[in-house]
Amino acid sequence: MTAIVSYARISAEGLEQFWVEQDATHSRFVRWTELGAGLPDDSGLPSLKGKYFSAEPSARFGRMDLLCKLGLGAAELCMARAPILTRQDVALVGASMLGCLEVDAQFHDSLLKGGQAGASPALFVYTLPSMFLGEIAIRFGLRGRTTLINTGRTSAIAALASGVRLIEAERSPFALVIAAEAVGAAARDLDVVERGLSGAAAWLLAPGKAGFREISSVRVGAPEGRRLAGGAEGFGLTHLQALHEALMYESGWFYCGEGALAISFELAARAKA
Amino acid sequence: MPAPHNITVTSLGALTPLGDAASTWRELLAGRVAFAPVGKNRPYIAAHCEIPRRDESLIMRRCLALALEATRGLKLDQSIDASRRALVFASTKGEIDQWELQRAMRVSPMDCSVMLSELAREVAARVGIAGRVLAISTACCSGAQAIIEAAEMLEDGDCDEAVVIGADALSLFIEHGFGALQAVSKSGARPFDAARDGLTLGEAGAAVVLSRGSGAGGRLVGWGGSNDANHISGPSRDGSGLALAVERALSGLDKSRVSAICAHGTATRFNDAMEAHAFRNVFGESIPPVFSIKGNLGHTLGAAGVLELIVAAQSAQQGLAPPTAGFERQSPDEPRLDVVHMKPRSLARGYLLSTNSGFGGMNTALVVEAP
C-alpha cells in the first residue's frame, strides 16, 4: 500500500493543498485574487511569485523559468504539509510533455537576434525539461534518485504510477512526484489539437496507510476500471482534473491510455474523515 | 540486503562518430579521435556522425536517423508478444534542430516531434515496438536513467523485453548553449588531464535490448541514482552526490570486484575533479582503473549513458579497457586516479562501473559484468 501523504495543485483557479494531520484529512484552497496576484498572462496564470508558495521562498525563484516555478511551487505546497523526512531518501519523479519548450523558444529567439554572442547561459541552463527537479532537490536537500518521464498526455499519471512502484518495490522510502506544464506561445504554435493550460501538481508518497489517500496497486499495459476523462489542462496534465475528482470522492480502479500504453491504479477505499 | 538484479543485455547497436558498435569498440581500443571542425566561422570542434542515407525523409531528421541507425541489427526475441516489448527512449533535446529550422523559417504550425513523447512514439512505430513507450530526459544522465527505468520495468513484469535507445544530434542550439556556458574546449576534450579546458560535443545513437534472466550478453547487476541537491548547473565539489549513486548501484555487491570505471569524464574542470572525489569516497585508496570515451567521441548527451553501458559491457566481456584519448597527466590537486591511457589495459574479470552526471545535480551509476 502506498500512501499519498500530501497533495498539492496549481491551476488557473488558484492553489490547493491536501494533507493528513492527527488522523484527519485537511485541505486549503486559495484563489489567486486572495494572494493579490495580477491578471493571467500568456501562460494562463498570473505572474508567479515565490511568496505565493512559501513564507520563506527560494531566493532563486524570480530567476526561474515558468516550468521551474510551477514545479517548485507545487513541491513547496506539498512539502509544507509533509512530516519530517530523511531527505536523502526522497526520490524525485517528474512529468512533463511540453517540457521546457517555452524557454527553448526564448533561448532560440536570443540566438536569432544576437547569434552566438546573443546566447544566454542563464537561459540555456533551463533548456532541459528536468531542471525543475534540480531546483526542487536544491530547495529541500533531496538526494534521492531523479527522473523525468514523458509519455505524452498520460505523463502525470505515468509519473504517479512510477512513484508508487518505487515505494512498492522498496527502491525508495519516499517519492515526491511532480507533474508540470508551462503553456505559452511556443506550445500554441505546435500542430496539436489542444490549447492547454499551464499548471502543476505534486504528490508525496510513502509506504503504508497513513495518507490523505492510498493507492493499493498500479498496473501498466492493461486498462482496468473506470477511464479517467481528458480535461482542458491538456498535454501531460490531460487527466489531472479527473484524477483530482477520483482522489476527492472515489475509490476502485481507474486508468488512462489505451491498450499497451494504459496505466491503471487502484485507489483504496477512504477511511478518514 | 536487496535481492541481486538479473537483467541481461541481449543485443546492442550504435552509430557513433567512429561507426557502428563493433567499429566504435575497435577504434576506441586503437585510440582514434573523431573530432573535426564544426564549420566555417564557428570556433568549435565536434564529433559528427556519418549517417548512411537509407531514407530520404530522414536527411533533415538527424536525431531520428541516429536512433534508427542504432537499432539496425538489433536482435529482438521474436517469441515475445510485440505488446510486451517496451521502448524507453532517452534524449536531452530530441529534434531541436528541426524545430529550430522551422522557427527560423516561420513555419506554422510546428511539427510536434519536438516533444520527446511524440518522437519516441515515432521511433517505436518504425522499429515495430507495440508495447509501452516512455521518453526519459534527465540531462546528461538521460541514457543511463532510461536503462534504469527499463530494467525496473522488466523486474516489475511490465514488459518481457525492453529496447533502450539514446540519441542526440548536434545543433546550433546545443552548440551555442554550451558555448555560452564556456564549457566547450577549443582544442578537444582531454578527460581527467591537468590541462583539460572543457568538453567537446558529439552526436550518436545507441541502443540495447534488455531482458530478464541470463543470456550471452553482459549482465546488468546494479544501478543507482542520486541528486547533488547543491547547484543547478555545476557538480558538487566533494563528489558526495555521485558517490551516493555509486554506493546505491553497488549495494549488495562486492565493490572490490569492480575492475574498471567507465567514467562520465566530460573533461570540464569541475566534472572530472568531482568524479575523482566521488571515486575516492567510494573506493578509498583502491580506486579501480578509470577511463572516459569522451576524448574520442565527445559528449553525446542523451546517448552517452547507453553508449557507455555498451562500452562497459564490451570492456567486461573482453577484459579490456580502452585508453582515454587526450590524457597525459592528472592535476596534483585532485584525488589520484589510475587513468587508462596510451594503450588498452587488460582487466581482471569483474564488474564494470559506468557513471554519468548532469545539470540539475543528477547522477547515475550502472554496474555490468560479463556473463
Image (tube, coloured by chain):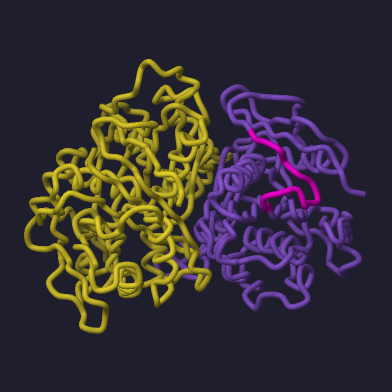
Chain colours: A purple, B yellow
Q: Position of residue A184 (x, y in %)?
A: 67, 52
Q: Position of residue B170 (x, y in %)?
A: 34, 51
> Quarter-wise, where is residue A165 in the image?
top right
| Position of residue B85 in the picture relative to residue B314 (left or right) | right
> Could you tell me which residue is drawn at 50 percent across and 72 percent down?
B231
User: Principal SS element in the magenta part?
Assistant: strand
Q: Is residue A269 visible?
A: yes
Query: Is A172 part of what is drawn in magenta?
Result: no
Question: Viewer-proximal residue, B219 or A97?
Answer: B219
> Could you tell me which residue is drawn at 71 percent across and 75 percent down?
A57
Q: Position of residue B92 (x, y in %)?
A: 44, 51
| Position of residue A92 in the picture relative to residue A34 (left or right) | left
Question: Viewer-proximal residue, B11 or B114?
Answer: B11
Q: How many marks?
A: 0
> Quarter-wise, where is residue B325 in the image?
bottom left
Magenta stretch in the rendered image: A205-218
Question: Viewer-proximal residue, B270 or B155?
Answer: B155
Q: Position of residue B78 (x, y in %)?
A: 36, 17
> Could you tell me which residue is drawn at 14 percent across and 40 percent down?
B23
Q: Is residue B38 visible?
A: no
